[in-house]
Amino acid sequence: MEFNSAAIEQKWKESWEKHQIYKISNSSVRPKYYILDMFPYPSGAGLHVGHPLGYIASDIYARYKRMQGYEVLHPMGFDSFGLPAEQYAIQTGIHPGLSTNDNIKRYRQQLDNIGFSFDWSRQVSTSDPEFYKWTQWIFIQLFDNWYDLSKAKARPIHELETLFESEGNLKVNAAHSPIDPMDASTWKSFSKKEQSDVLMNYRLAYRKEAFVNWCEALGTVLANDEIKDGVSERGGHPVERKPMTQWFLRITAYAERLLNDLKDVDFSDSMKIMQSNWIGKSIGAQMFFKIDGHDSHLEIYTTRADTIFGATFMVLAPEHDLVAKITTPDQKHTIDDYLRFVGARSERDRMAEVKEVSGAFTGAYAINPFNDTKIPIWIAEYVLKDYGTGAIMAVPADDARDHAFALKFNLPIIEIIDKSMYPGATIEDKLGKMINSEFLNGMEVIEAIDHINGRLEQMKIGKKQLNYKMRDANYSRQRYWGEPFPIVYDLDGIPHTLNQHELPLLLPDLDDFKPTANGKAPLSKLTDWVHLPNGFTRETDTMPGFAGSSWYFLRYMDPHNDHTFASKAALDYWQDVDLYVGGTEHAVGHLLYSRFWHKFLFDLGYTVTKEPYKRLLNQGKIQGISEMIYVKKEKEAGRHIFFSKELVEADSKDYITLPVPIDYVKDYGSMKSYLDADGLKKYILFLPDYKDALFRCEAGEFLASDFPLHGKIYTLGELAKMSKSLYNVINPDAVVAEYGADCFRLFEMFLGPLEQSKPWDTRSIDGVGKFIRRLWATFFINGLLEISDEPASPEELKILHKGIKRITDDIERFSFNTCVSQFMIILNELKSLNCNKRVILDPLVRLIAPFAPFIAEELWQHLGHLGSVHLATYPKAEDQYLLESTITYPICVNGKKRGTSDYPADADSKALEAMTMQLDFVQKWLEGTPPKKVIVVIGKMINIVV
RNA sequence: GCGGGUAUGGCGAAAUUGGUAGACGCGCCAGACUUAGGAUCUGGAGCCGUGAGGCAUGGGGGUUCGAGUCCCUCUAUCCGCACCA
């Protein structure tokens, strides 16, 4: 029988589907194991060879665990709400629901081609009403809860109302937005609307007016992590700061737990560091300053309260509320000018000019509470509205930014720390002795911080305080393709949640998806939908892309439950994700949000573990090679001139490079990739603008149409991201069609360590292809099945069991590239023994099955088995075959290898030492001098020290 | 600027605990079978040297009988964060 990968794959895909062999149960007696992939966004471009890398790794592990007797939950779904589908809809007029469905079908087909063992009966899509019903439901829970800091737990909002009723908010220790103190009678005197506004400051999902990242081009606001380098991550459009009323999630309430519980999860150190940097905890103090001639106080946050006597000016964020209040008439003009300057700058300008110092003086003064010195109050861009209190005391002697500011505006600098004892200490190190600081003089910095914090508290002008860089997550999008909020506003503008039986609130159909210019969401155009008969109105914003992905892993546990997001039984059985595989790009966005939601649901008693993911594995990216062609920047003689690579100096600035579709290029991916006459013809058809262009190469200069047959235009191969615009995308379907799915899977693993990014090297896939054919040829000699029933030799058993040991060890540490190498080694060794014995091949097929599921299934059948190999047990290495009778030791003199010698495996170190000294070459090296010592490392080597 | 990672043949890489560096694969070279080879099989090869031997894991230093692996330092490169008071 000839090896035909396409036929085998077809046959087994159908069989798996028919027998539902990957369907799993929630009521198994087997131990559970949950292996999750980050579900894809189903874009129109389809999968490229980079996407399946993590999926293949998790599939191998899932199949392996299943064969070891675990009930393995290994699901897949689609993150199908979001901006790209909507952008596509705006461009084409096609409803995003339709294009999304098409894309999902295509993705599903591409995934099936690769032979994954997903339980598709559990597929979820975030844009499916059955799914987003529960996204809306969780939002309602967030709205209906507040965070009790004393208990470190979310609690129902009605409990808070009861508290307000009896004692106001004075003793409540809650995570909240800035709010005035209020006693019980004040609370009772409030109108319904006022009470609702007060509660808003405590809800975990709340509305507030805030400066948000507004993206004009996308017509929506974006969360901080949806912005890269001052422009939108999707599309690269400019982003500006703008005050708007928006929904937020109070993720900051969970900051401490999100930070703390990192110690309990198995994530890489760099991933944990990224998350804790994002959370950005700092320990400092809040301090209140009197403002000269005003009733109001200035509240600042500092980590260095000890430096108060070096504070020679104060700085407010330009957006700070006090600015308008305290600016003196003299300075009004200056301040207004500065505010105009700041307002006109985009986020990007601001980031690009971080080094530039700018600011303006308000004319007002704060008073140092310890010595009554007047301190001028300035405003400046470098102080951020959202961090701390949006105001600082500036200590130019001890802070680089304050220092630069003082120099620019000629403000005094008072040295307050003597660092002479610490020569290497930088300006920001907390080292040195206090000077010029009255009662702090002579103290060490650390000591002084403690002392001053005590003083502040004593004088009731401040106290020790924690601060986090992380902000509450903006949860509103002025877009169409997202979950509608289950919120209606009554005639007073008070928001109310829908009842559970009214969920899901379906996303209504719409023809015109374009965002409106005034910042209103597309849904606001549907006046019939917005205005309810009783005069109430609906919220028209939709939820952001991260809403569905913040909890999808829970829905897989019980995907079709109509009564709850997942049943108690399902949650109790599956608990949490044992292994989560995905890219590092979600380090701070998705991973933090989903940890937050999971913890919230834990507080409410739904989820049973503190953390959603026990272990996180980050796969690297697969890069593509793009082929570029040199073109002269300025046209010569009115036409473009294209140059062969060898005619161009590498760093010359006279040329630009244009991407060439990789299909047109010969020897793609090598250093000598080129366009021949054929490829060039295609390329010219592809680029009609250049049809009159000249081409220059070694063979001379010519028009494309008279290109000499022997000529070559060499192209420049460059490592780049796989993308449509570089025409270098490699579709897994094409690879599977040419080499087979098993070969594709093995090759992706063989490329290198999972965590590393690496280029797709099309040429070396042949090696894996050869392995597959050799594996097949071990069973079929000249197309005929030949398997011997003879017992195995000790040598054969040794090869097999050493291999099993190595491979199971390697799988456990996710070193799949070395697993593939081991398969090749085992096969080479068996081949050299001409081994075709059933007792060896049977475990070998099971060993390979997780990696190459199709060929393993086929060979399993040829071995005479009826069931699927994927339901068989994974082979175990038996110790008896791992033992050696002799061991070859390298023999070194002073660490240099001088030879080797065989010894019995059971010899102890004394015996080895004695035997070693008898060896001729050792005698020769020692030349009669007795050795100082002989070091014997059992199982490794023997070293003689002279 | 701050934080983290990486650096091994022509290439992708391996080396599990400090113990024979370069397994396995690509590419390359030679040979066999072939009308043919972009098929298959066999063999070769880190570098220098005819050879014995010497030199080799980004550079320099250290610890050790012994270092790709541990420590210090420098360089290159990738990733993340970036006015966070």
Image (cartoon, helix red, strand yellow):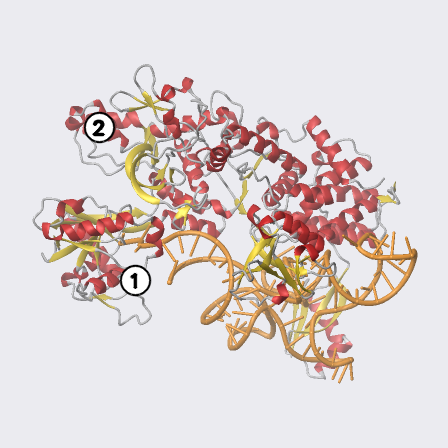
Q: Secondary structure at mark 2?
A: helix
Residue annotated with mark 2: A164
In the foreground, A370 or A179: A179
Seen as rendered, the residue at the extreme top is: A533
Task: State which quarter of the image contains the N terminus of chain A.
Answer: top right
Residue A259 in which image quadrant = top left
Crowding at dot 1, Cα within 10 Å, few <14 / some 14-19 / many 20+, comes out as few
Mark 1 to mark 2 CA distance (whole Å): 44 Å
**Residue position for label 1:** A428
Q: What residue is drawn where x is 61% and y is 34%?
A: A106
Instruction: Judge from the rendering whether residue A863 lies leftward or rightward of residue A926; answer left or right.
Output: right
Label 2: few (<14), some (14–19) or many (≥20) C-alpha neighbours in 10 Å = many
Disc 2 sits on a residue from what chain?
Answer: A
Question: Hey, which quadrant is residue A485 in on the image?
Answer: top left
Residue A236's mark?
A: none
User: As drawn, is A109 to the left or to the right of A544?
Assistant: right
